[in-house]
Image (cartoon, rainbow, N blue to C red):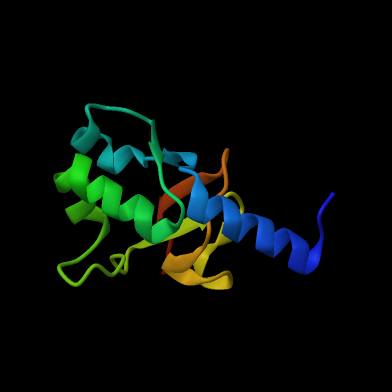
């Protein structure tokens, strides 16, 4: 098993040389934009690349996730597996085969 720098080097190599099939979990509120699908599969090497692919394939869904500048809308949170992308490298977070990108609405109370 690779650790530390060796793992980071392997992930970067995979990112540059292969396409990565990942799953995107779509929240109920946005499923109307993708024919009711709960999950989508696509190839992307980073969170930003996944969003770019959504923009290409499902532009209306993309516009519900990102604003006109490409920033994730404030009422949504993105997680790769169980980690918020802000706790990693933001939209540059590297994706590896089998990762799941969760799009979750923000929860607030009052």
Count of numbered labels shown in the rendering: 0
Image height check: is 24 above or below 68? Answer: above
Between 16 and 67, which is closer to the camera in this rendering? 16
Residue 104 position in % (x across, y down): 42, 52
Q: Quadrant of residue 32 in the image?
A: top left
Residue that appears at 37% across and 50% down:
50
Residue that appears at 27% across and 56% down:
65
Between 1 and 72, which is closer to the camera in this rendering? 1
Residue 36 position in % (x across, y down): 27, 27
Residue 70 position in % (x across, y down): 24, 67
Q: Taking the image as drawn, is residue 106 in sight?
A: no
Residue that appears at 22% across and 27% down:
35
Image height check: is 86 above or below 52? Answer: below
Position of residue 82 in the picture relative to residue 4 (left or right): left
Position of residue 69 in the picture relative to residue 11 (left or right): left
Between 45 and 109, which is closer to the camera in this rendering? 45
Taking the view exactly as shown, the residue that stands out farthest to the right is 1
Q: Quadrant of residue 83 in the image?
A: bottom right
Residue 108 position in % (x across, y down): 42, 65
Between 46 and 101, which is closer to the camera in this rendering? 46
């Amino acid at each position: 098993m690779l650790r530390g720098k060796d793992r980071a080097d392997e992930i970067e190599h995979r990112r540059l040389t292969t396409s990565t099939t990942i799953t995107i979990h779509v929240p109920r509120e946005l499923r109307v934009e993708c024919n009711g699908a709960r999950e989508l599969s696509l190839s992307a090497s980073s969170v930003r690349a996944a969003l770019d692919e959504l923009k290409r394939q499902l532009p209306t869904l993309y516009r519900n996730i990102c604003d006109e500048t490409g920033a994730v809308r404030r009422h949504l949170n993105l997680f790769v597996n169980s980690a918020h992308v802000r706790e990693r490298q933001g939209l540059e977070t590297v994706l590896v085969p089998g990762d799941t990108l969760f799009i979750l609405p923000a929860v607030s109370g009052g």
